[in-house]
């Protein structure tokens, strides 16, 4: 990670509300039904620009399904309103063009293409046929900036397939930046990363989060404690708690869900002492 | 911006080198096709070679659609046949007019006294040439939109395109007004030039050669453009491209329609060069045969399909003369071996050797793949 964007504000609890921004994502009564199985029921979420919201919960809580529903991958009922535009019912690529970007649990960069090519494709959804039929000449300033932000400038001409696991995830985040997404939905971005990579990813999220709305689905509780501005806890498709990290940890329902699961999970939200910074 | 300067210089360097190499490559190709081949090959061999060039033109399109776009086009015989039949219809009408007949010779034998309505526009050379370009492209675009928008892909798309080829071949066999299973043959003139004259047949060869160079140039531009990069991205991860704000169907339709156009042009050249077009050139077997050369040559490269198609067609002529029954088995075996074990084709062998050589030497520079990276499957 190189250049620090010193001027961009960092994410804060409750977002940048009242700081003159009107960007928001409002989810109301979101439900997803898989042939009778209700994966997500009546989920409400309100996110403002500057939010770094963590979506946590046990396996099968419906965290990824919420992201799938917002991005149009699975059909859902309810309402998802992004700064006044209804997203539900729109096609995947239309939602993406409205500024909602996502990553996947497994990095899904284009392995045969270089880092630069990956970013160039991500930046190009609005290009004309004439531009498309011509050769790419160099990188735009937005792509250069994104490469510096994600720390992959040195690897611009390497095929994405040879990148380390963490670098692939950063490239995915970089693709969201040049895609001009202002709502970033990240599905387990630090899974499988080393401790150092996690820290770098967290700092990256702080750098880019101020001007955007970031939702992170995560199992890593240390990571959540270190970087979340707010947390929503899902269990069995429902929101059971929402608030700051401390509020959520103290919530009895959350303790019940996490401690009461019979398998005896290692990851405990209601940890007795703070392990994060 | 420490990175920019050397990167920019390198980019300009490779661009200049690339441009020089491109011109050199096209120059060598032009010399081989226009100067060497006509001198070295006998009249008979040259017209045989012209036929191979037609297959190579089809192959360039398949390389684009299948190699770069991941669409297994098992029915290119449809578009080859459309181009071939439309050209043949014009040639038959023109021949009949020269002899002062109302209808072509085979219709007289079949007892058809009046030119069918759908034949009549093909009396015009301009209409015929336009139709050869427009009709297959439009059909491919309409078909492509219908299929790709519904997210039909992989084996389902392959089966669909092959069924189309089978259907068209069966349909043509039943059409007396298109010569039935014999198809259309015995063309005497080509836009006013008698085809008996060796000079005119040589002209046809030159037309095929020039068309091949043009088609390769178009494919090269498409593959090297941003569109080409996007096409590879769609091939490797269609869903991911969707989440970047593109509709993958639109991207695939372009490659599919271009491949159809190339096949149609090849068919239109094939008819006068070989002297016939028949359902046997349209159906399932010829459609698969188009694919074999592409697979062997290297489907994802620019020139692999061209060389593979010419090589396989040449080998077929050579061996099928001596071992007529064994050749077809050998061809099938070769196809299975290449697709199963060398998906990159002959073009991939060079890369394979380069990799083996590199592996023997200690690795220098470049990021070491993270151990975790091996485990990650790159599919969402």
Image: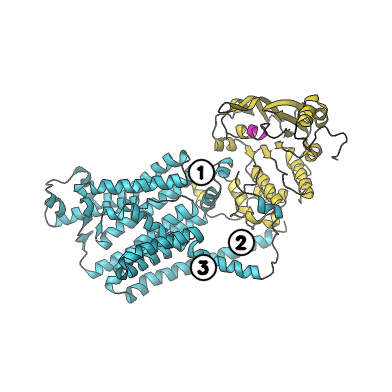
Chain colours: A yellow, B cyan
Region rendered in magenta: A60-66
Chain where mark 2 sits: B
Nearer to us of marks 3 and 1 is 1
Regarding mark 2 in the picture, which secondary structure is present there? Answer: helix
Q: Are marks 2 and 1 on the same chain?
A: yes
Structural distance between the alpha carbons of marks 2 and 3: 15 Å
Structural distance between the alpha carbons of marks 3 and 1: 32 Å
Nearer to us of marks 2 and 1 is 1
Nearer the N terminus, badge 2 or badge 1?
2
The residue identified by callout 1 is B248
Q: Are marks 2 and 3 in contact (CB under 8 Å)?
A: no
The residue identified by callout 2 is B11
Point out which mark residue A117 bears. none
Whether residue A14 appears in this view of the structure is no
Nearer the N terminus, badge 3 or badge 1?
3
The residue identified by callout 3 is B21
Q: Residue at x 56, y 54 (%)?
A: A136
Q: Are marks 3 and 1 in contact (CB under 8 Å)?
A: no
Whether residue A62 appears in magenta in the rendering, the answer is yes
Q: Is residue A94 left or right of residue A189?
A: left
Chain where mark 3 sits: B
Identify whether A217 is placed above or below A153: above
> In the image, residue B241 lies at what x, y percent?
56, 44
Structural distance between the alpha carbons of marks 2 and 1: 29 Å
């Amino acid at each position: 990670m190189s250049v620090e964007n010193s001027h961009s504000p960092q994410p804060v609890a409750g977002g940048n509300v009242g700081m003159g921004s009107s960007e928001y994502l409002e989810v109301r009564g979101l439900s997803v039904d898989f042939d009778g199985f209700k994966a997500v029921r009546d989920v409400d979420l309100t996110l403002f620009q500057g939010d770094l919201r963590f979506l946590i919960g046990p396996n099968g809580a419906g965290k990824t399904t919420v992201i799938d529903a917002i991005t149009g991958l699975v059909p859902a009922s309810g309402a998802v309103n992004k700064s006044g535009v209804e997203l539900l019912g729109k096609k995947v690529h239309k939602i993406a063009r409205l500024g909602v970007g996502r990553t996947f649990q497994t990095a899904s960069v284009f392995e045969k293409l270089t880092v630069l090519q990956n970013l160039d494709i991500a930046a190009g959804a609005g290009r004309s046929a004439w531009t498309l039929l011509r050769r790419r000449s160099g990188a735009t300033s937005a792509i250069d900036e994104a490469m510096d932000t994600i720390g992959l400038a040195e690897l611009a001409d390497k095929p994405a397939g040879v990148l380390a696991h963490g670098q692939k995830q950063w490239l995915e985040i970089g693709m969201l930046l040049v895609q001009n997404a202002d709502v970033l939905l990240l599905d387990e971005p630090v899974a499988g990363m080393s401790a150092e990579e996690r820290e770098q990813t967290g700092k990256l999220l702080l750098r880019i989060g101020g001007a955007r709305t970031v939702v992170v689905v995560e199992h890593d509780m240390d990571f959540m404690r270190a970087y979340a501005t707010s947390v929503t806890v899902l269990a069995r498709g429902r929101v059971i708690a929402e608030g700051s990290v401390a509020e959520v940890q103290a919530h009895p329902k959350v303790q019940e869900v996490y401690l009461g699961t019979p398998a005896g999970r290692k990851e405990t939200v209601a940890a007795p002492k703070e392990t994060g910074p | 911006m420490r990175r920019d300067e050397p990167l920019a210089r390198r980019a300009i360097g490779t661009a200049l080198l690339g441009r020089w190499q491109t011109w050199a490559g096209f120059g060598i190709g032009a010399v081989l096709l226009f100067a060497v081949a006509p001198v070295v090959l006998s009249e008979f061999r040259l017209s045989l070679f012209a036929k191979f060039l037609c297959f190579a033109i089809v192959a360039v399109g398949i390389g684009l659609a299948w190699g770069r776009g991941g669409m297994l086009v098992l029915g290119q015989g449809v578009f080859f046949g459309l181009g071939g039949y439309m050209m043949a219809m014009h040639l038959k009408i023109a021949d009949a007019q020269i002899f002062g007949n109302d209808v072509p010779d085979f219709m007289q034998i079949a007892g058809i006294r009046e030119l069918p309505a759908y034949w009549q526009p093909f009396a015009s050379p301009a209409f015929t040439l336009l139709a050869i370009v427009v009709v297959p492209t439009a059909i491919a675009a309409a078909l492509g939109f219908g299929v790709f928008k519904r997210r039909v892909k992989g084996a389902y798309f392959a089966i669909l395109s092959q069924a189309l080829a089978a259907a068209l071949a069966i349909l043509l066999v039943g059409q007396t007004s298109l010569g039935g299973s014999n198809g259309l043959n015995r063309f005497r003139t080509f836009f006013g030039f008698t085809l008996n004259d060796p000079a005119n047949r040589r002209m046809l060869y030159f037309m095929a050669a020039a068309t091949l160079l043009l088609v390769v140039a178009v494919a090269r531009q498409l593959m090297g453009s941003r569109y080409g990069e996007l096409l590879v991205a769609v091939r490797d991860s269609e869903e991911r491209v969707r989440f970047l704000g593109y509709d993958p169907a639109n991207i695939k339709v372009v490659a599919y329609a271009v491949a159809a156009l190339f096949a149609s042009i090849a068919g239109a050249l094939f008819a006068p060069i070989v002297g016939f077009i028949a359902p046997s050139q349209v159906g399932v077997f010829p459609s698969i045969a188009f694919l074999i050369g592409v697979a062997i040559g290297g489907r994802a490269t620019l020139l692999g399909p061209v060389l593979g198609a010419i090589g396989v067609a040449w080998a077929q002529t050579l061996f099928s003369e001596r071992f007529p029954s064994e050749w077809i088995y050998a061809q099938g075996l070769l196809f299975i071996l290449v697709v199963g074990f060398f998906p990159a084709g002959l073009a991939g062998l060079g890369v394979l050797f380069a990799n083996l050589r590199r592996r023997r030497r200690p690795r220098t520079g470049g990021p070491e793949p993270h151990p975790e990276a091996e485990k990650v499957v790159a599919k969402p």
